[in-house]
Image (cartoon, rainbow, N blue to C red):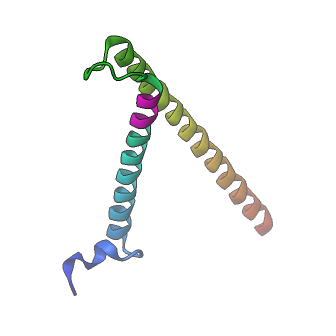
């Protein structure tokens, strides 16, 4: 059997970690691209020079900080909601067995 085979098998623990890590990397790249595009579109309004002026740079910094902060908060809320939902399901299952 090929030693690299486990990396692509869904039931393999190593494969799950590798696939999960790859998925997280792709998600981080996608988020980075979204932030870049959104903040550029929002902050850069004219192209009179090749350089980004200070107002645009400050806007981009503020925009990116806000975007990351908001995304992080939304992810935290989502995770907490998922945990609560799982806890409720476990409690319901435990109640059925009593």
The outermost residue toward the top is 54
The outermost residue toward the bottom is 1
- In the displayed structure image, the side of residue 85 where residue 61 appears, left or right: left
- In the displayed structure image, the side of residue 70 where residue 25 appears, left or right: left
Q: Quadrant of residue 8?
A: bottom left
- In the displayed structure image, the side of residue 19 where residue 71 appears, left or right: right
Residue 65 at x, y percent in the picture: 43, 25
The residue lying at 44 percent from left, 40 percent from top is 34
Residue interval drawn in magenta: 35-41
Quarter of the rendering occupied by the N terminus: bottom left
Quarter of the rendering occupied by the C terminus: bottom right
Residue 26 vertical position relative to residue 37 in the rendered view, above or below: below
Residue 65 vertical position relative to residue 83 in the rendered view, above or below: above
- In the displayed structure image, the side of residue 90 where residue 41 appears, left or right: left
The residue lying at 68 percent from left, 52 percent from top is 85
Q: Quadrant of residue 44?
A: top left
> Is 95 inside the magenta-drawn segment?
no
Residue 87 vertical position relative to residue 45 in the rendered view, above or below: below
Main SS category, magenta section: helix
Q: Quadrant of residue 15?
A: bottom left
Number of numbered discs overlaid on the protein picture: 0
The residue lying at 76 percent from left, 68 percent from top is 97
Say which of 50 and 63 sits in front. 50
> Is 39 inside the magenta-drawn segment?
yes
Residue 61 at x, y percent in the picture: 38, 21
The residue lying at 20 percent from left, 83 percent from top is 2
Residue 13 vertical position relative to residue 66 in the rendered view, above or below: below
């Amino acid at each position: 059997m090929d030693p690299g085979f486990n990396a692509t098998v869904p039931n393999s623990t190593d494969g799950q970690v590798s696939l999960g890590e790859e998925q997280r990397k792709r998600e981080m790249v996608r988020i980075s691209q979204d932030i870049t595009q959104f903040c550029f579109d929002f902050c850069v309004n004219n192209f009179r020079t090749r350089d980004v002026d200070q107002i645009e740079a400050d806007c981009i910094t503020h925009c990116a900080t806000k975007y990351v902060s908001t995304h992080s908060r939304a992810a935290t809320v989502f995770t907490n909601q998922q945990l609560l939902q799982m806890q409720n399901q476990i409690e319901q299952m435990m109640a059925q067995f009593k």
